[in-house]
Image (spheres, helix red, strand yellow):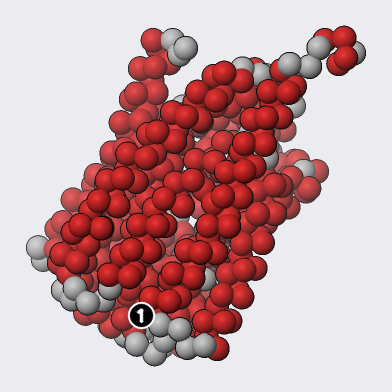
Amino acid sequence: MLGNKAARKSAVFFLLKASNTALASVWSFLLAYALVRIVGLESYAFFATVIAFASLVLQADLGISIRLFGQLRQNFLHPENGSRQALGNAVAAALASYAAIAVLATVVFGVMVWGLGLGVAQYHAIYLLLFAGSVLPLPWMILRLTANAFDYYVLTEAIDCVRRTLLLALTAALVIGLPLMAYAVCFVLLWLAALAVLFVMARKRLDILTGARIREGFAVLRADLRGITASAVLSMSEFLIYIYPYYVIPLTHRDALALVAFDMFYKVTRFATTAYLTVTETVLPHQTRAFHAGNVPMLRKMMLVAFALAAVPMIGAIGIIGLFGDRFFGILLGNPDVVTPSIRLTICVMLFLMMVQTVSGAVLAGIGRLAVLARRASTTFGLMLVLALVSGLQNWTIEQFIAGYAVVYAYEAFGYFWSMLMMLREVSRKRHVPVASVA
């Protein structure tokens, strides 16, 4: 059982994560509501594409942050395993690289927008600012996971909670008349402030960042090429699975509303993933402790807790979409016919599938089992490409495409679940191997 102090810390963390999930979800839909009314449905589709393109840049992480988290976590729990200074150098190298990539990507995006005349000319500067703010989570990820590996997860969530609260207030101001340009500028400034605060606090509390050498850090990362390759395949496959329809749908559907319909599907299901991650990140410290200690009963218990807690937002979301989806999307978009009943049904199915996938995959990633996840995810993405080809050749409707998307996604969800069960069986067998036979 967890001690009182650990239980209190987990409860605070869960409340912060839940708050951040709620803030992120309300912000996402409130921003869509505001943009649709400020720029119209047709122009909103391009704004959604800008954010999707920024998400592509975030994949420059290549899963290195979660790979480093697994190594840092193991070193924190068992300092004799690995060099903390070497890991600190790797974190510094990754952080410097991510910051440079975010800046470079913003410059390239700006050149593309003005050079190719993308979107609406009067919104070019706003596109650039929203893009810049949307790529800043790249350096944030490595800082946050590094701090979390050393049990500073409450601190990182508290900083993010303040940022999200201010951002939501800013978005509410946008709805009632704040100029879109002012909103875009403040969006970037809030991210920069959060990054600065987290960096300063991490430097004060984490000895691994003291005296870290970037050049030596790149050598550490190169030495772990096999592990990073697995994390890169997993990260890119997962990202492309979620985001590739933004690039396929405009090619196969001339009606911009088809992309808007998928964007709503994406936003609701990604909200679900964020809610499920609230649960998985809360129990992950206890799961990793149990795994590395060989405490099978506690590991099983924490898995059951994760599934039970994740089922709460899943059931709530299914209830809202199933019973009030027509009104919800009608108010949000000003047109209840964009998200049809069949799409709403598919959303409900995806909410369940994403719960299974997220809870199962989070623990496997946290203990470093990235290779098995990478194989499942890359195969799923291959199937997604087949889906895109078939749907394009057969002129599928957007409803048929989204339904097919959910069917393919089920392969990955249940594949992750099976891998998680195999991990539990493996740990249980190791725990019951007689000492004599080990020798």
| Rendering coords of residue 289 (x, y %) | 58, 21
Dividing the picture into quadrants, the one containing residue 184 is bottom left
Residue 287 to residue 49: above or below: above
Dividing the picture into quadrants, the one containing residue 125 is bottom left
Comparing 352 with 50, the one in front is 352
| Rendering coords of residue 35 (x, y %) | 23, 70
> Residue at coordinates 33% horizontally, 63% vertically from top-left?
345
Position of 355 with respect to 145 (left or right) is: left
**Helix, strand, or loop for circle 1?**
helix
Dividing the picture into quadrants, the one containing residue 10 is top left
Instruction: Quickly name the residue at label 1.
Output: 258
Comparing 277 with 297, the one in front is 297
> Residue at coordinates 39% horizontally, 17% vertically from top-left?
7
Residue 373 to residue 284: above or below: below
Residue 39 seen in the figure: no
Position of 192 with respect to 411 (left or right) is: left
Q: Of the residues shown, which amino acid type is indicated by label 1?
A: Ala
> Residue at coordinates 55% horizontally, 25% vertically from top-left?
300
Position of 347 with respect to 40 (left or right) is: right
Number of callouts? 1
> Residue at coordinates 70% horizontally, 54% vertically from top-left?
375
Question: Is the C terminus in the top left, top right, bottom left or bottom right quadrant?
Answer: top right
Position of 20 with respect to 201 (left or right) is: left
Residue 86 to residue 326: above or below: above
Residue 374 seen in the figure: yes
